[in-house]
Image (spheres, rainbow, N blue to C red):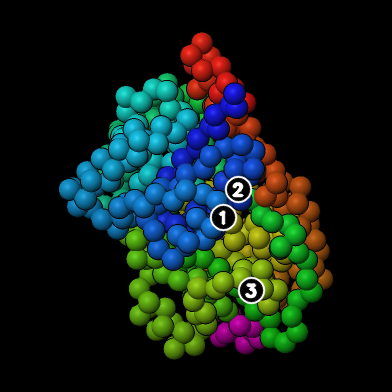
């Protein structure tokens, strides 16, 4: 009699996010004997997900919605999915899946729940009154929802772990840190800088908390100094986020001249080959930014802000420069230092590649995540051995 394959269900906000950030881990789980399901709002990546061997379950989750009835529908939908599919492990990723998925999982004690925060984003970085009120409400809800016997927290940096342990009261032994979603070090390889005017690249979703306006101001300052460089924004806005920058504003910046907005890019490795310096002036709330890990793997010197997540990958003076957040003048000075010193850029780039390969490779993240799955699946199997011994893996 063959053993039943254990089931893992990923719950993510959008199909594109799963494809970009979690597909390698899910593929490795599939190859290691798990059945893998994906519940997400389906957009343009649904066929790719199905074609890669995963079962896709459309979800009505909408990150931009605050309709009480729509949110209740999402929770009910998730609860029905959990009852129907009976996953051994459900892997919630990002704020709404964690909140609604944890509500839907209440009472299901045989299902192991991983709540993965890919940074705390808007909750910790936005100074708005709305964000502060929301944070207080969510901390109270999480204190109840995340302190379940079958619930585990997965964080990307130590500061986020320490904050949630303090605010939500989750025991530290119920938390795991896996730094980022990894980088394919074969796809993102070292290349020489492209000839011509150097490009300073900021690749990100176009959100205010990513420090986009600080980058624009820094570009203005450097242009006023006569700096010969191009300042490029790569990425689209995100209407589902409360901090999205309107496309009209992005076009206004481009038309005014300090920056070029290139929009969404299909190949980040090719984008990085065109760059001389990579920049992310985030205001905070990061996990470990994928864009910076990819930049380091591509041997690009980095300028980033000294905030949790960014400083996990950027070591000041080693593979880049760290500056205070929300300080365009300091940002401009750091960018200028690297633009004016090609040997320094090259040295920092080489060290960045070493850090990416040794600490942030996709393979390392995959192995760490599979180890977590094995640990949690053993907790599912233990009470079932008498009834279903063939489920052991």
Residue 184 rendering spot, x and y as whole percentages: 69, 56
Identify the residue under disc 3.
271
Q: Residue at x 72, y 87 (%)?
A: 196
> How many neighbours does mark 3 have within 10 angstroms: few (below 14), some (14-19), or many (20 or more)?
some
| Front residue of this view, candidates 175 and 70 | 70
Residue 376 rendering spot, x and y as whole percentages: 54, 27
| Front residue of this view, candidates 27 and 170 | 27
Secondary structure state at the residue bearing disc 1: loop
> Are discs 1 and 3 less than 8 Å apart at CB?
no
> Are discs 1 and 2 less than 8 Å apart at CB?
yes
Residue 35 rendering spot, x and y as whole percentages: 53, 39
The N terminus sits in image quarter: top right
- Lower sequence index among marks 1 and 3: 1
- Lower sequence index among marks 2 and 3: 2
Q: Residue at x 44, y 51 (%)?
A: 56
Comparing labels 2 and 3, the label whose residue is closer to the camera? 2
Comparing labels 1 and 2, the label whose residue is closer to the camera? 1
Q: Residue at x 51, y 49 (%)?
A: 54
Could you give the CA–CA distance between mark 1 and mark 2, rounded to whole angstroms?
8 Å
Q: Residue at x 60, y 41 (%)?
A: 29
Q: Quadrant of residue 219?
A: bottom right
Specify start and end residues of the magenta stretch as a single range: 220-230
Q: State left or right for residue 55 relative to residue 181.
A: left
Q: Quadrant of residue 300?
A: bottom right
- Lower sequence index among marks 1 and 2: 2
Could you give the CA–CA distance between mark 1 and mark 3, rounded to whole angstroms?
25 Å
Q: Is residue 264 above or below residue 52?
A: below
Q: Which mark is residue 384?
A: none
Identify the residue under disc 1.
52
Identify the residue under disc 2.
27
Secondary structure state at the residue bearing disc 3: helix
The C terminus sits in image quarter: top right
């Amino acid at each position: 009699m063959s053993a039943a394959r254990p089931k893992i269900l990923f719950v993510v906000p959008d199909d594109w996010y799963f494809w970009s950030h979690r597909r390698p881990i899910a593929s490795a789980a599939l190859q290691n004997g798990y059945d893998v399901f994906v519940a997400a709002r389906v957009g343009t990546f649904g066929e790719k997900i199905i074609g890669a061997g995963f079962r896709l379950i459309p979800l009505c989750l909408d990150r931009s919605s605050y309709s009480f009835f729509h949110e209740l529908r999402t929770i009910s939908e998730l609860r029905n999915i959990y009852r129907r599919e009976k996953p051994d492990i459900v892997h919630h990723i990002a704020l709404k899946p964690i909140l609604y998925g944890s509500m839907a999982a209440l009472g299901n004690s045989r299902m192991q729940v991983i709540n993965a925060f890919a940074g705390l984003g808007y909750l910790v970085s936005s100074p708005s009154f709305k964000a502060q009120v929301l944070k207080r409400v969510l901390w109270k809800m999480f204190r109840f929802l995340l302190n379940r016997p079958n619930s585990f927290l997965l964080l990307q940096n130590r500061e986020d772990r320490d904050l949630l342990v303090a605010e939500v009261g989750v025991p530290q032994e119920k938390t795991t840190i896996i730094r980022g979603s990894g980088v394919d070090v074969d796809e993102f390889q070292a290349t020489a800088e492209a000839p011509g005017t150097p490009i300073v690249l900021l690749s990100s979703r176009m959100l205010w908390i990513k420090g986009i306006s600080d980058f624009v101001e820094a570009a203005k300052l450097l242009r006023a100094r006569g700096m010969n460089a191009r300042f490029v924004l790569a990425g689209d806005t995100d209407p589902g986020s409360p901090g999205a920058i309107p496309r009209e504003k992005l076009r206004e910046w481009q038309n005014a001249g300090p920056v070029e907005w290139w929009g969404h890019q299909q190949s980040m490795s090719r984008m990085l080959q065109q760059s001389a310096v990579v920049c992310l002036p985030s205001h905070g709330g990061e996990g470990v930014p994928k864009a910076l890990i990819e930049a380091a793997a591509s041997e690009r010197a980095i300028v980033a802000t000294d905030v949790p997540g960014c400083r996990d990958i950027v070591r000041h003076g080693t593979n880049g420069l760290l500056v205070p957040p929300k300080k365009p003048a300091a940002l401009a000075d750091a960018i200028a230092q690297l633009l004016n010193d090609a040997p320094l850029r090259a040295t920092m780039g080489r060290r960045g590649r070493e850090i990416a390969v040794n600490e942030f490779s996709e393979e390392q993240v995959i192995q760490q995540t599979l180890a977590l799955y094995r640990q949690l699946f053993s907790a599912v199997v233990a009470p079932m051995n008498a009834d279903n011994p063939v489920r052991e893996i």
